[in-house]
Amino acid sequence: MGYGGVAALLLWSVLLCTYDIRERRLPDALTVPPAVAAAAACLWDVSLVWGLMWPAWYLLVGRGIGGGDIKLAVPLGVVCAAAGGPFGVVAGLGLSGLLTVGAAVACGRRSVPHGPSMLSAAWALIPLLCMYSGV
């Protein structure tokens, strides 16, 4: 992926973070198309199915996780799986949770938007996972 693709993903991430912080929800227009594309990619490369662990975990836990977070977890999980396999997905899931708890503590609130933490975790982990897995 060239710089244009990275710039587009960065813009998408900023839009999602801004919207989630302001509105406390993630819009379908920004989450459904990437979720569908990521799910389709799993049909092309079965190893990417590991990425569906992230949204599956959210569906199992349920508490405090919105539908937008679940839809966002699909492409983020698949990309983490592509970069680091099952370990990458578990690392993304864990780091996003830690970042959300840290944000809640820092803000002195019981509830904070989770989307920004999910995106931050993915942006932090994917280069490291690619570097160490040889992708």
Image: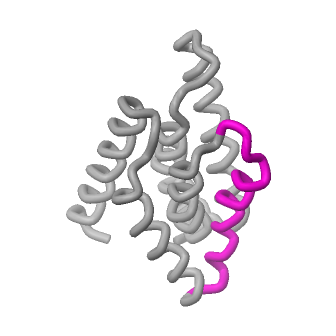
Residue that lies at the very extreme toward the bottom in this rendered image: 44
Residue pictured at 58% horizontal, 14% vertical: 109
Number of labels in the image equals 0
Q: Quadrant of the N terminus?
A: bottom left
Instruction: State left or right for residue 135 relative to residue 7.
Output: right
The location of residue 106, given as percent across then percent down, is 55, 14
Residue displayed at 55% across by 23% down: 103
Q: Residue most toward the right?
A: 60
Of all residues, the one furthest to the top in this rendering is 108
How does the figure colour the protein chain or chains?
one colour
Q: Main secondary structure of the magenta part?
A: helix
Left or right of 97 on screen, residue 106: left
Q: Which residue is pictured at 51% across the width and 82% down the height?
A: 40
Residue 19 included in the magenta stretch of the image: no
In the figure, residue 57 lies in which quadrant?
bottom right
Give 107 or 62, whichever is nearer the viewer.
Answer: 62
Name the residue furthest left: 4
Q: Is residue 26 left or right of residue 19?
A: right
Q: Nearer the viewer, residue 89 or 37?
A: 37
Q: Tell me: residue 49, above or below residue 131.
A: below
Vertical side of 86 occupied by 123: above or below: above
Within the magenta stretch, is there residue 61? yes
Q: Position of residue 51 (x, y in %)?
A: 64, 67
Instruction: Identify which residue is drawn at 69% across, 70% down.
Output: 50
Magenta range: 45-64
Q: Against 10, is 78 above or below?
A: below
Q: Is residue 22 left or right of residue 2?
A: right
Location of residue 60 in the rendering, given as x and y in whole percent from the top left corner: 78, 54
